[in-house]
Image (spheres, helix red, strand yellow):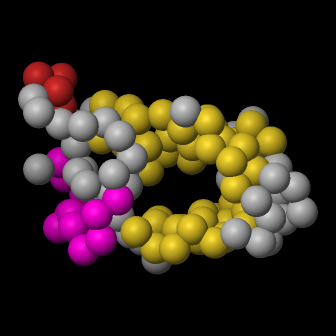
Amino acid sequence: SIFRLLPGAHILPHTGVTNRRLIMQYALKGSAGVKFRVGGEFRPYGGDGQAIVFDDSFEHEVVHNGTEVRYVLYAVLQHPDVEAAECSAGESHGHGEAQGQQAKGPQPA
């Protein structure tokens, strides 16, 4: 999927529904001035053509203080610590957002 975010936008803190996957956001265009927070750490994308990969079961948010529309390629990746059979057993790979379902730790459940 390709996601678009307008300048001045703020995606409020939220969590994903599982820690069995990783999320990759590859900055295609407009990443200057965008801050991305996972857990307690804010960081920039590092420029267009750079990617951020994270466990979205940890609280995260995006703040766009730049001047261009931001476009990212969004991909769901298999967590390297989870067997493929475990990942596909009844799990949706959509970007569901469930408040309050933060993982207890960095290891997949």
Q: Position of residue 23 (x, y in %)?
A: 43, 43
From the viewer's perspective, is residue 77 above or below residue 96?
above
Q: Is residue 50 left or right of residue 88?
A: right
| In this view, 22 is above or below 9 | above
At 57% from the left and 68% from the top, the residue drawn is 11
Task: Tell me if 65 is positioned left or right of 98 in this view.
Answer: right
Q: Residue furthest top?
A: 85
Q: Position of residue 70 (x, y in %)?
A: 76, 51
Does 101 lie within the magenta span?
A: yes
Report which quarter residue 62 is drawn in: bottom right
- 73 above or below 84? below
Residue 49 spot, x, y in % from top left: 75, 36
- Location of residue 25 (image quadrant): top right
Whether residue 77 is visible? yes
Magenta stretch contains residue 105: yes
Residue at (72, 44) in percent of width and height: 71
Count of numbered circles in the view: 0
Q: Is residue 83 visible?
A: no
Which quadrant is home to the N terminus? top right
The residue stretch that appears in magenta: 97-108
**Residue beneath the point at 30% across and 41% down:** 21
Q: What main secondary structure does the magenta stretch of the protein show?
A: loop
| Residue at the image point whose x is 37% and y is 55% from the top | 56
